Image (tube, helix red, strand yellow):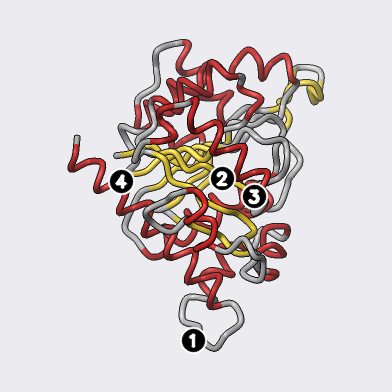
Amino acid sequence: MSVVTFWNDEKEQTGKTLNITAIVTHMAIEHNYKILVISTGHKDTTLDRCFWEEKKPRKNLGLFGPNTNVAMEDGIVGLETMMKSNRISPEQITNYTKIIFKDRLEILPSFKGEKLEYDELKSYYPEIINLANRYYDLVFVDLDNELGKELQDTILSNSNLIVTCLSQRLASIKAFMKKREEIPILKSNKNLILIGRYDKFSKYTIKNISRYMGEKNKVSTIPYNTLFFEACEEAKVPDLFLRLRKIDEEDRNSIFMQEVKRTTDNIIYRLQDLAIKM
């Protein structure tokens, strides 16, 4: 059982959430793991849109008709309530998630309430992650900067593997190399570098980036793919991956699928390697 945290501290978009989406979908289809994805952001619907269409929240009914101010709670809010009362066990977490593939892939969405409420409950994320790690084979964490440095550091230090998501820009690569000198864990084998929205026609190719950064292994990538990005907006990612399972090498989408597979295999191999060395 392992925690894999996807992280970046850049303001620019690195495709972090979509990187997770591609990897966990492929992994759930091709491997026999029970996976949970935890979105730690505030009002972030990126992950939601990849898997299900947005619906209006249900309302509680009071004595005097609908209570329009109080929505029926689930997700992290429901978990927080159970944890406060000490009535939660690891296997109960699944009662508060959205199931994508039964016994394979579940999602704990981001909190959609007010910022003040988010600031009050976000301290529960480390405990929820640790609890989930006792029930799921793999817990993927979409680490959001809104958590604040202290909570981010706690989650990163408790993770079995950190996937640092960078953009395919020299400035992004240089900024990470500088930060790597300041944060020891980013120089360790627990860190894997991933370039999102990768463009194979850029001069910053996998080989060039790997050589520039002094990486022994090739940097992992998730290439830009039109069908994938459209599916992420239409809640059709599972359908797309099932459809692309058996395409041949001549298909224009084959490079995307090959790189998703390579990145997934890299994560699995690195986790296995780290487990052996513990």
Q: Quadrant of the N terminus?
A: top left
Residue beneath disc 2: 165
Instruction: Say if 25 sits above or below 89 in the image.
Output: below
Tag 1's secondary structure? loop
Q: Which is more N-terminal, label 3 or label 4?
A: 3
Q: Is residue 112 left or right of residue 32?
A: right
Looking at the picture, which amino acid does disc 3 mark? Ser
Q: Is residue 93 left or right of residue 69?
A: left
Instruction: Say if 25 sits above or below 171 in the image.
Output: below
Q: Residue at x 60, y 64 (%)?
A: 223
The tag on residue 271 is 4
Q: Which is more N-terminal, label 1 or label 2?
A: 2
Looking at the picture, which amino acid does disc 4 mark? Leu
Instruction: Say if 217 sits above or below 114 in the image.
Output: below
Nearer the observer, disc 4 or disc 2?
A: 2
Which quarter of the figure has residue 10? Answer: top right
- The residues bearing labels 2 and 1 have C-alpha atoms spaced at a distance of 29 Å
Q: Which is more N-terminal, label 1 or label 3?
A: 3
The tag on residue 167 is 3
Q: Residue at x 44, y 49 (%)?
A: 214
Q: Which is more N-terminal, label 4 or label 1?
A: 1
